[in-house]
Every structure is written in structure tokens, then in C-alpha cells.
Amino acid sequence: MNKISAWVSAARLRTLPLSVAGIIVGSAAAISINRFSITIFILALLTTLGLQILSNFANDYGDGVKGTDNEDRVGPVRAMQGGLLSAKELRNGIIVTSVITLLIACTLIYVAFNEQHFGISLLFFFLGIASIAAAIKYTVGKSAYGYRAMGDLFVFLFFGLLSVMGGYYLYSYSIAEFIVLPAITIGLLSTAVLNINNMRDQESDKKVNKNTIAVLLGAQKVKVYHVALILIAFLSAIVYAILQWKQTNAWGLIPLLAFIPLFKNILFVWRNETPAFLDPELKKIAMSTFVYSLLFFIVQALM
């Protein structure tokens, strides 16, 4: 495998659709109040993609140097684990990706707020720095929060609340109460993706003291946790559709179709006893979340 292919592998392209779901939903909500901007939308997508790729590089590096990615790991072979990229190359990749992502984020902030909203611009700048730090610190360093059962919380906050509500704010300069429900939906579904990953790696993580929620709860209780994540996400989506009924009518129910594969996922996870079989479920949840965001966007655009 050449270096380009190695970097593409380390970027984990299959994770990228999930990462932009929050921005798509936040932007769709902006359409509903006639505040959508294609420039902001593109810059927000690029910023989010940059953060996700940065997180993937950092995760590959952090788990690699800690020895978490070893022969006991169930999932796909990582770039550093498989010898495709060295620790030094991944460190350099993290630095370069951080700089590029920060530059795009600064451009996004300037386009969204200009010079007239310096205080808000400064706040979003620090949120951008915090997002970059969170992407790196998931597995990198002695205080990596991914090893302290805090990964789920950070995913919910950054992929859900910050992505959707922050994305909406870029257009509207406000946080409307109705945007909280879609943010919760995206946040919980994103957390469910991480949880499947941690359920798959539960035994290998336990051996290297990587304390995820799956490790702490155990094989049976984590299944209950997983079901709760998806069902609460579905309930939040239903409540939002009901509250928006006057604006969207029955069309607002269309995004709920994305939950059909997720109900199948619940049954599969509940019955499954072989961690390796959970790997395909990652893509199922991630793509269902992405489809939900696209349908959400389409409905808002057509209303």
C-alpha cells in the first residue's frame, strides 16, 4: 500500500458521513427561518470534516503508542498498527490537519459574523480550539478522556449539541428552543456509533485498561444502554415532528424512516454474543444518522 492509500485508510472515510450529520440538520433548521447561506454551509462542512479526520489520526496515533491496537483488537487494522504509517508521520499529520482545520474554522467564523460581532466570533474561535483539543485528547496523552469512560459524553456534546445548535447559530445568531430536539437525536445516534465500536472492542480494551462505558457496564448492561440511546433519539425525533406539524404536516415524519434500520440494529445487538459481528453495525448506524439528516434537510428545503 502506498502512502496516499495509507493516509486515506487512516482518515477512515466511512466515519465522515456521520460527522457532518449535525451540520446538515443545523443548516436545515436555518432554512426553516430563511437564514440559510451556501457559503457558511460549505465552510461548516469542511471544518467538521477536518475535525473528524483529525480525530481519526489522533485516535490511530493514541491507541497505537499505548498498545491498545494490538493482535487482540477485533476491528479493522489501523494504519499505525499495521505499519502503514509511523508514529512520527501520524504526529505530523495531526499537526498539519489541526492547522488546516483551524484556518477553515477562522474563515467560517469571519464569514458568519464579520467584524460586527467580535464577542461571538471570539467565543466560536475558542469553541474551535476546544473542538480540536477534544479531537486529539480522546486517546492521546496520559489524561486521554476516551480511557476514562468520557468518550460518550464528549461525542454527545460535540457531535450533537455543538454541531447542530452551533451550526444553527452560525446562520441565525440565536438558539431557538426547537433546535434542541434534533441536536439530542443526532447526539444520541452518534454516541450509539461509538458505543457499538466500544462493545466490539470491549475485551481488548479491558486488557489494556481502556475504561469505556462498555467496559464499565459489562456485556449485558451495555446492551440496555445501547437500546436506550436509540429509543430516546427516536422519541426526540418524534416529538420534534409533532411540534413542527403545522409547518411540515405529514412530510415532517419522513426523516423517521431512517430509524427502520436502527430498530433492526437494536434486535441484532440484543441477540448478539460475538463482538466481531458488531463491526458492520457501525456503518448501519452511521449511515442511518446521515440519511436522517439528509431527509431532515430535504423536508425543510421543500416546505
Image (cartoon, rainbow, N blue to C red):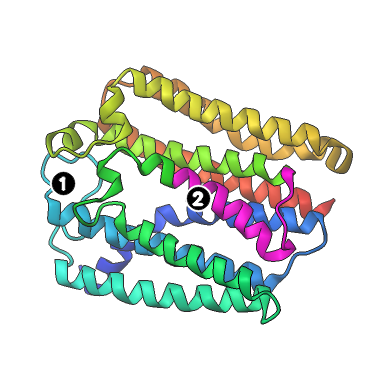
Residue at point 48%, 43% (across, down): 156
- Is residue 80 shown left or right of residue 215? left
Q: Which residue is most to the front?
A: 119
Please provide percent x and percent y for residue 53. 38, 63
| Magenta span includes 127 | no
- Range of the magenta residues? 155-177
Q: What secondary structure is marked by label 1? A: loop
Q: CA distance from mark 2 to mark 1?
A: 24 Å
**Residue 107 percent location from the top left of the image:** 56, 79
Q: Main secondary structure of the magenta part?
A: helix
Label 2 Cα crowd, 10 Å radius (few <14 / some 14-19 / many 20+): many
Look at the image and tell me in which quarter the N terminus lies.
Answer: bottom left
Residue topped by disc 2? 159
Q: Quadrant of residue 96?
A: bottom left
Numbered-mark total: 2
Is the C-beta separation of discs 2 and 1 under 8 Å? no
Relative depth, front residue between 155 and 300? 155
Horizontal placement of 71 versus 40: left or right? left
Q: Residue under label 1, please give it.
A: 68
